[in-house]
Amino acid sequence: MAPAFPYTNYANASAGEPITYCVGPKSTSTRFDIHQLLLCTSSPLFNEPSGVPKIITRPLYLPTIDPTIFRLICVWLYEGIPPAAETPNDLLILMKIWVALSKLGIWEKQNTIMRLGMALMQPREFTCGIETVRWVYENTAPGSKLRGYVVAIFCQRGAEITKEMFSPRIEKLGIFRDAVKFFKILNRVRAGNPRGVDGYGFHASEDVLYMWDVNDPSRVVATVVVDLEEVDYSRIRYPLPSFLVWGDRWEDLPDKFFFIHKNEGLKEGKEVLKQLRRM
C-alpha cells in the first residue's frame, strides 16, 4: 500500500522509511505515515539506548487520539510552526494536542503547548470552562502535570460557578479537591498584593512589608504601616495580579511546576513503547 499523509506531502522534508500510525478507533482509524528520522529526532521512544533508530516493522495504533489532532501535530513536526491558538475554545485543542504528544514521547513540544496555553489565557476576559478541565481529567492519570496546569488556569480564569459543576460526574474526578489546593496558593499571592479602594492611597507610600516565614514558605507575613496612622482595612482589597501566576512567589511561567522532562516523556509514551517492544 502506498504511503499516506504526511509522508507523501513532505517527500523531501526528511529522510528514512515511513512509520505508519493508525489513529482513532480501530474500525474507523485514519492512517498517517511519518518519516522515521523525523520521529527519531523528536522523541526518545524511537531510538535504542545507544541512539540508533529502532527497527519498526508494523503499524502503531493510537485508538484514543482524534485524527484531527494528530494531523495538527504532523504539520507542526514538518513545518516547525505550532498550531494557532486565539480564542478560549482553543485551550481544549491545546490540551488534546498535549495528550497526543505524550503518547509519542514528544516531551519538548508538550512544554511548548504549556507556554502557548499560558499566553492564550492571559486576558482576564478569557474563561476556562469546566468541560475543558473535565476532559483533561478524564484523559490523564492522577498526578499528571497537565491536571495541575489546567486547574491553575481554571482557578484564575474559570467561568461563573453553576450547579452543573457539582454533578456526580465532575465530583468523582477530584477537580475541586485539587482546585482547593491551588486556591490556597492564590490566597498567599493575594496577601502580598494589598490595594486601596475608593481613593484610599496607602499603597502609594509603599509602606507595605510582605515576607515569607523562612522556616515555613507557606506562611505569609504581611504588615501595613501608614505614617503611624490606623489602617482602615475595610478599604483594602487583595486582588490577584492581572497575569496568570503558577506559584505563591508570583511565578509567571509554568515551567518550574509543570514542564515535562525527557525521562518523564519516556514514561508518558508507554502505550507506544509497549507496541515497539513487541516488534
Image: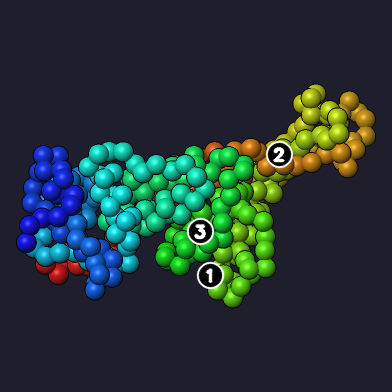
The crowding category of the residue bearing disc 3, from other C-alpha atoms within 10 Å (few below 14, some 14 to 19, many at least 20), is: some
Q: Residue furthest right?
A: 230
Locate the C terminus by quadrant: bottom left
Marks 3 and 2 sit apart, C-alpha to C-alpha, by 30 Å
Marks 1 and 3: CB-CB under 8 Å?
A: no
Residue for badge 2: 192
Q: Position of residue 266 (x, y in %)?
A: 28, 57
Report whether residue 247 is seen: no
Which of the two labelled residues, at mark 3 and mark 2, occupies the earlier sequence position?
3
Residue for badge 3: 132
**Residue at (67% x, 60% y) in the render:** 161
Q: Amino acid at mark 1?
A: Leu
**Residue at (55% x, 40% y) in the render:** 122
Question: Can you say whether 114 is above or below 209 in the image?
Answer: below
Q: Amino acid at mark 3?
A: Thr
Q: Amino acid at mark 2?
A: Gly
Residue for badge 1: 173
Which of the two labelled residues, at mark 1 and mark 3, occupies the earlier sequence position?
3
Q: Could you say whether the residue bearing mark 3 is in a helix, strand or loop? A: helix
Q: Position of residue 49 (x, y in %)?
A: 17, 53
**Residue at (52% x, 48% y) in the render:** 88
Image quadrant where residue 165 sits:
bottom right
Report whether residue 45 is seen: yes
In this rendering, the label closer to the viewer, 2 or 1: 1
Which of the two labelled residues, at mark 2 and mark 1, occupies the earlier sequence position?
1
The crowding category of the residue bearing disc 1, from other C-alpha atoms within 10 Å (few below 14, some 14 to 19, many at least 20), is: some
Q: Is residue 213 left or right of residue 12?
A: right
- In the foreground, 23 or 107: 23
Locate the N terminus by quadrant: bottom left
Image quadrant where residue 272 sits:
bottom left
Marks 2 and 1 sit apart, C-alpha to C-alpha, by 32 Å
Q: Which label was assigned to residue 147?
A: none
